[in-house]
């Protein structure tokens, strides 16, 4: 797998968080289900720390952080409402978090596409 840039890693983490939030929403009625989340900021800081400590043997090497090496810590979310079936999913909170994360993910994807389109224009001008 190719090495990831910081922006790619951030987008990967957003997608992973979306999966966790979607799982919470899907299990809103599952007795005993414990809501989970990814601390996006902490995961991104850890990924950045990993990227900064990578040593390359050649100036053309980019570092070897891949999506496989990014492992965000998934933690249980604090209980915001008590329920008789011990399910800790607050559906309103999950929907809001999912929507916010989806908007941020779309923004990051648009930025990446714009960057690649601009890079393509620059390369076509060179030819």
Image: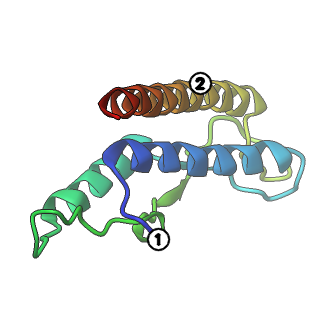
How many labels were placed on the picture?
A: 2
Q: Is residue 20 left or right of residue 44?
A: right
Q: Nearer the viewer, residue 83 or 50?
A: 50
Note whether 68 is above or below 93 in the view shown: below
Residue receiving disc 2? 100
Residue in the image at 16% along x and 63% along y: 60
* Residue closer to the observer: 29 or 21: 21
Location of residue 108 in the rendering, given as x and y in whole percent from the top left corner: 49, 30
Q: Which mark is residue 1?
A: 1
The residue sitting at 46% across, 61% down in the picture is: 73
**How is the rendered protein coloured?**
rainbow
Could you say which is closer to the camera, residue 70 or residue 63? 63
Q: Name, please, the residue furthest toward the front.
A: 127
The dot on residue 89 is none
- At numbered mark 2, what does the secondary structure look like: helix, strand or loop? helix
Q: Residues within 10 Å of mark 2 (few under 14, many from 20)?
A: few
Give the x, y percent position of residue 21: 67, 44
Query: In this rendering, is residue 100 above or below 28?
Result: above
Q: CA distance from mark 2 to mark 1?
A: 29 Å
Residue at horizontal 32 percent and vertical 46 percent from the top:
6
In the rendered structure, the answer to whether residue 91 lies left or right of residue 48 reads right
Instruction: Give how far across and how far down residue 1 sits, in percent.
Output: 46, 70
SS at badge 1: loop
């Amino acid at each position: 797998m190719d090495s990831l840039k910081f922006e790619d890693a951030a987008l990967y983490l957003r997608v992973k968080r979306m999966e966790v939030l979607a799982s919470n929403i899907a299990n809103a009625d599952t007795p005993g289900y414990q809501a989970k989340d990814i601390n996006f900021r902490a995961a991104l800081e850890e990924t950045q720390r990993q990227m900064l400590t990578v040593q390359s043997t050649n100036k053309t090497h980019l570092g070897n952080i891949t999506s496989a090496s990014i492992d965000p810590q998934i933690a249980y979310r604090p209980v915001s409402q008590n329920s008789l079936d011990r399910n800790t999913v607050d559906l309103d909170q999950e929907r809001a978090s999912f929507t916010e994360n989806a908007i941020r993910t779309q923004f990051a994807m648009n930025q990446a596409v714009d960057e690649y389109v601009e890079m393509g224009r620059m390369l076509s001008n060179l030819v």
